[in-house]
Image: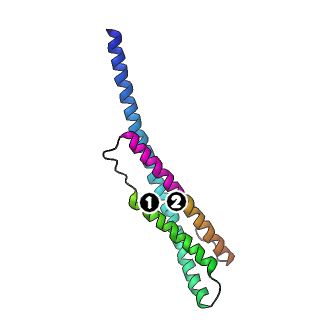
Amino acid sequence: MKFIFFYVLATVAVCLWFSCKQEQDYKTIRAEVVARHDKVMNDADLANGQKSVLDSIYRSLKSSGNDTVKLAAVIKLVDEANHQMEIWMNHFEPDISGKSGKEASSYFKAELKKINDLDKQFKTVIIRSDRYLDSLHIEKRKTLH
């Protein structure tokens, strides 16, 4: 009888421990997603600052009849990255009401992958715009974080 009581008590304790652990897991992942989002937003601000410079150069070159194809391609990359970020932000749902801990963990892991992909996209955009601006001998702007 003591053995059965101990077994039931141990089973309940293990179940409670795992349920708390799962809850912590999704909270940790969600916090990582939000932190990564904040970093990507800083990179987006940097990319948009560079885009302002690129737009100004584009208007100047276009009015002088110079080739603007490469510059337009870099500007388009910034616009695409901004568009992807906007889509992600509109679909991201930090509230997990109605989801189990496991479902929440899966959701935030998928969102972490998406925001990491956006991070890579913005880094690529910044590098490309830096290279273009460097080719024109325009002094360095802010750098990546």
Query: Magenta includes 113?
Result: yes
Q: Image height check: is 23 above or below 90?
A: above
* Quadrant (top left, top right, bottom left, bottom right) of the N terminus: top left
Can the viewer see residue 145?
A: no
Left or right, 115 with respect to 104, comes to right
Q: Secondary structure at mark 2?
A: helix
Task: Please give the count of numbered marks on the rendered protein.
Answer: 2
- Whichever of callouts 1 and 2 sits on the residue coming sooner in the sequence is 1
- Quadrant for residue 122, please give it: bottom right
Q: Residues within 10 Å of mark 1 (few under 14, many from 20)?
A: some
Can the viewer see residue 81?
A: yes
Real-space CA distance between mark 1 and mark 2, rounded to the nearest whole angstrom? 9 Å
Instruction: Please tell me which residue is depicted at 65% across the width and 74% down the height of the picture.
Output: 132
Helix, strand or loop: magenta stretch: helix
Locate residue 6, reporting x and y percent: 35, 15
Locate residue 126, reporting x and y percent: 59, 67
Q: Which mark is residue 118?
A: 2
Instruction: Please tell me which residue is depicted at 62% across the width and 79% down the height of the picture.
Output: 69
Q: Which mark is residue 102?
A: none
Instruction: Out of 18 and 49, give the one closest to the viewer.
Output: 18
Q: Label 1 sits on what residue type?
A: Trp
* Quadrant (top left, top right, bottom left, bottom right) of the C terminus: bottom right
Query: Magenta includes 83?
Result: no
Q: Residues within 10 Å of mark 2 (few under 14, many from 20)?
A: many
Left or right, 57 with respect to 10, comes to right
- Quadrant for residue 14, please give it: top left
Q: Label 2 sits on what residue type?
A: Leu
For label 1, the residue is: 88
Locate residue 133, reporting x and y percent: 64, 75
In the rendered structure, are the residues bearing label 1 and label 2 in contact, judged by CB atoms less than 8 Å apart?
yes
